Amino acid sequence: MIHISKRTDFTLFKGKAEWLNHYVGWGVRLIAVFLSLVVSGLLIFFVTKLNPVKVYGAMIDGVFGTPRLTWAWVRDFTLLLLIAVGLAPAFKMRFWNIGAEGQVLVGGIVAAAFMIHLGSAGIPAALLIIMMAICSMAAGAVWGVVPALFKAKWNTNETLFTLMMNYIAIQLTSFLVPKWEHPKGSNSVGIINPDSNVGWFPKLFEKPISGMTQGAPFTRFLTAGEPVFLNVMIVAAVVLFMFFYLKKSKHGYEIAVVGQSENTARYAAMNVKKIIIRSMTLSGALCGLAGFMAVSGIDHTISTGTAGGRGFTAIIVAWLAKFNPFIMILISGLLVFLEKGSVSIASEFGLSKDVSHIITGIILFFILGSEFFINYEIKFARRARKEA
Amino acid sequence: MGTFFDKIITLLTSAVAFGTVVMYGSLGEILTEKSGHLNLGVPGIMYMGGIGGLLGSFFYEMYVPSPDPTLCLLIAIGAALVCSVLGGLIYSFLTVTLRANQNVTGLTLTIFGSGLANFFGGSLNKLAGGVGQISVAVTSGAIRATQPLTDNLVKTLSASGSGFVRFLGSVMDVLDRLLFSYGFMVYLALVIAILLSLFMNRTSKGLNLRAVGEDPATADAAGINVTRYKYLSTCIGAAISGLGGLYYVMDYIKGTWANDGSIEALGWLAVALVIFATWKPLRSIWGAYLFGALYWLYNYIPGLSRSSQEIFKMLPYIVTIIVLITVSLRHKREDQPPTSLGMSYFREDR
Amino acid sequence: MEENVKTAAGPERVPAVRMEGITKSFGMKKANINVDLDIYHGEILSLLGENGSGKTTLMNMLSGIYFPDSGSIYVDGKPVSIRSPKDAFDLHIGMIHQHFKLVNVLTAAENVILGLKEGFVLNLKKVRSEVKKICERYGFDVDPDKKVYDMSVSEKQTLEIIKVLYRGADILILDEPTAVLTPQETTRLFEVMRNMKKDGKSIVIITHKLHEVMEISDRVAVLRKGEYVGDIMTDETDPQQLTDMMMGRAVTLNIERSEPKNVRKCLEVSHLSVIDTDGVKKLDDVSFTANGGELLGIAGISGSGQKELLEVIAGLQPAVGGSSVVYTDMDGKTSTLLGRTPMEIKKLGVHLAFVPEDRLGMGLVGNMDIADNMLLRTYQDGGGVFVDMKKSRKLAEEIVQEFDVVTPGISTEVRKLSGGNVQKILVGREIAGNPSLLMSAYAVRGLDINTSYTIYRLMNEQKQRGAAVIYVGEDLDVLLELCDRILVLCAGRVSGIVDGRTATKEQVGLMMTRLSEAEAAK
């Protein structure tokens, strides 16, 4: 006889160790991650007959083996992190913004448009970059705020609306790619401004660091990270901003209350519609910023794959982190590690790189499932006096 | 005149083919959503169904010198069902038993399913000696086999001398191409849609299912096993969605595999179609064909550039958004999503 | 007191249902503690107790909604385990819940057959004729093809009863069935209950209304604070003794009530009408004045428009044209509140405090800690973009200390506290803003006697401070001892305003139902 009830608190530890009870939840999640790695390892073993431990070793090697690889990991996970952090205000408000993919993409489109059409206009580099950032954010904000307006006004289902907006953005990209394609007939945009680098993220410390190429390993490591510095700084700033915005600001407080109960929000004299629209504007703008970063700071091109499913993965990151930007760092770091690691073992052992999605899926399944054991209590009741 | 007519007929037939993939996906999702579960894993499940069928028939065709078409068919369908139900089981275990968030679980299932499918799909390509080379000709042939009901009749009539009879022949020819030129899975989708509609509206189990999706607490109080209904509708729904993946792989792209993400796009379109059909299986039939026609419309509008074609492919999504907004504006009780959609049910919540 | 209570049943009768040592808790809250209860064949049993005494929880364990933490249940002497409503149906136990368990988008007939195993194909024709038969037998009037969302409250309840009868229940549990009924409907319901009793069915009626207990039941079982007090045959007892059992001691309330001082007009409501989203008229031409320095009580059967009245004043609900709500401040300046949002009302300088009925769904955020909940009213105060956490923590500490809130600390989530402590925090926060107008709805519902008295004292203090206090209550004894004037609502209309010091319980009780009588006479 199993009986399930809602858990109010863990009481695993008593007396002096009572404070540990607060961390049992995270312990459960860690166990889940560990179990999922075991299951993934078994799966790898059955498919490839390779020693899972070796495979994981190869993964670590494939991600952190060289400074260049490590920085590629940093570059990719900060992009995912930026989107997840951007989604946090929406999701904390229980606004199911499934449309990050589209918001990122329109941000990217705008950035690419600037690079292509103003590439030879002679605008000062810094000004151009700032204009690009602002316009990309505006585009993302528009993409996010349209469903929010309908949600606020007529309670139109935002999950499905934002989902549809993704595909409109994708088709918009498909529409523009042939217009911008280079070389003609390739059906791809190719690297934009490969020689002039107009609209690319500027190099921050070109001189001082490249002068130290011969230096100590750590300096060499830093040097390899040069192209990623601006990305990291932007994302770090957004993470800090979002942490304080959600935790300490009046807006953040409003978001939290609306997310818990709209009735209470109205009772507390909050303008729920305004809050929904404002938060989705912010959420969309940050996703647009991520699109700008992907195009201007990483890919230097645009395609329907620019967002690459990160808009969806970021939802999971934000949700699992309980909207805490710092925990999002850990989760996005782990997911991108798995992705990059799997791609590297895939090429090493001749597997398809899609194995990364399988492992990601398994880990997420486990973490999602583990929430149950944090929120609910299972009692194995003694069989009540009852005939057999 | 003739070419115009021909064009319309080809548009309609390609709309039917495209629509069938989406229809399977949406029918499964309608059944699932009727139990109150919004499964955003439909693309993943369609991937799993597609790859399952492909793997099953691939190995059968590889190891058996002269594969039997009927057996091919059964193996492909069986494998597709097993794989997609597996996806449904993962989803329902997490969301029904463990009460995990439905949207996040669904999205994860899509990541997992697409990874699984493309992993094996990619490896199959390698096994068969390169991209696009694998084919399961026998299975695909069996699935695509058309019904030669009227072919002979058409030929006889067309060959005859009399003008009227020849006219009759060409009318028959048009009907034949419009109605009888598809593999059996096109008709199976229609049958499933009708059966689903009958099930939901005319049977007591269907009534119970609707109640579970509307108000699980009430259904529970009425003695309905909410958990069982949620599991069954999710898993059977997954099986139906999975058939969409199978149809796509075996019929639409003729027994090959492409790592191009098109199943995912079709899967999301299936989710859109559920809204478009306002959770009614019969509406999803013409909705699916309409989506197909809208999607292929660009081929039949003269003077479109490669890029403006893409604008046309936006139509199904825009139409869905318009429907979504209209539904929320009109607020007609019959057209609303199941009331408990997206919320997990725990009896002792208070 | 308990020693006086005789066990009513003789030893020779085998009870239809026996509950033994039942305990059930929700988190830290204990809803039932070691309860024993017998239900016999062919009797009408009243389950009596105050709000929050655990009556509904206990019966929910019979109907399979909850499962007891410990204890055993026997049906006809055999031990059973009721894990789901289906198990309950199989044992012929049916419950009519206070919150109707009906699916809105389905028709009456579809709701009746829901969950039954009567063949694969839906045979609505048969259900329709069966429903008609039941209707004819008991004098109900329900259209089997009507959708539930088109039904009135009493139609819904009738449908619930038909549902249980259709399933052939032998043991019927009715949870406060008369709360939503007109006197005529109540009389008819009681007739039905007597008829069912004649068929040998057992009926449990959950109630806290003594006159109903006396009128309908054969036996009374009393719960108090989740514990079983005892049972007694109805004809061997009187309301006084039952009240004693319910309250644990004779009701000598002795609520302090000061004489109103410096009475000034504060709020004037005139011709207020409210129509809800379903088009039902919730308030009909309501007019009254609430004065500063005075405590105005609002009495009425639950659902008579109390909630709508307070929410309209607070700016949470729209009113029909022609209504007016005018606020007069200390300097005599008037401003209209109607058509303004809560924010706009606040900006007018109206210090409005509101303790809503739905504490965790409106007044507080259950998943936030005590300190964060303090911010709900004041987070906008002070310049800058950040909220003032220091102030809210200080306020939280003060309230916890002043009202003896039992909590591990101010960073404990509110939903983890017991009902009384939740209410102390809510009321504490509301009066911390020195309100000029304080409204409270069912402020003592579910609270223990001590906390209730704390709440009464606080209301009185606010009145002495000069605030206009509006107190929506359900216990007439309390209303009569606490309030200066009492406004009686009946079906959304004002049936009168009486002086709290001179009015009698009978008088107010009559007014609570008078309008519906007048309407029925038409």
Image: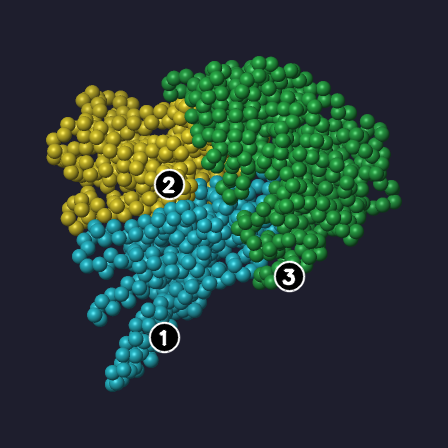
Front position among marks 1 and 2: 2
Query: Residue C40: x and y, percent?
Result: 80, 45
Among the chains pictured, the one given cyan colouring is: B
Residue matched to label 3: C129
Alpha-carbon distance for marks 1 and 2?
51 Å
Q: Is residue B106 left or right of residue B314?
A: right
Alpha-carbon distance for marks 2 and 3?
45 Å
Give the chain of mark 2.
A
Residue matched to label 2: A150
Is residue A361 at all visible to an observer of this figure?
no
Residue B148 - label: 1
Type of amino acid at the residue the image marks with label 2:
Phe
Front position among marks 3 and 1: 3
Alpha-carbon distance for marks 3 and 1?
50 Å
Callout 1 and callout 2 share a chain = no
- Assess disc 3: are there few (<14), some (14-19) or many (≥20) residues with their C-alpha within 10 Å of its C-alpha: few
Is residue C189 at all visible to an observer of this figure?
yes
Among the chains pictured, the one given green colouring is: C
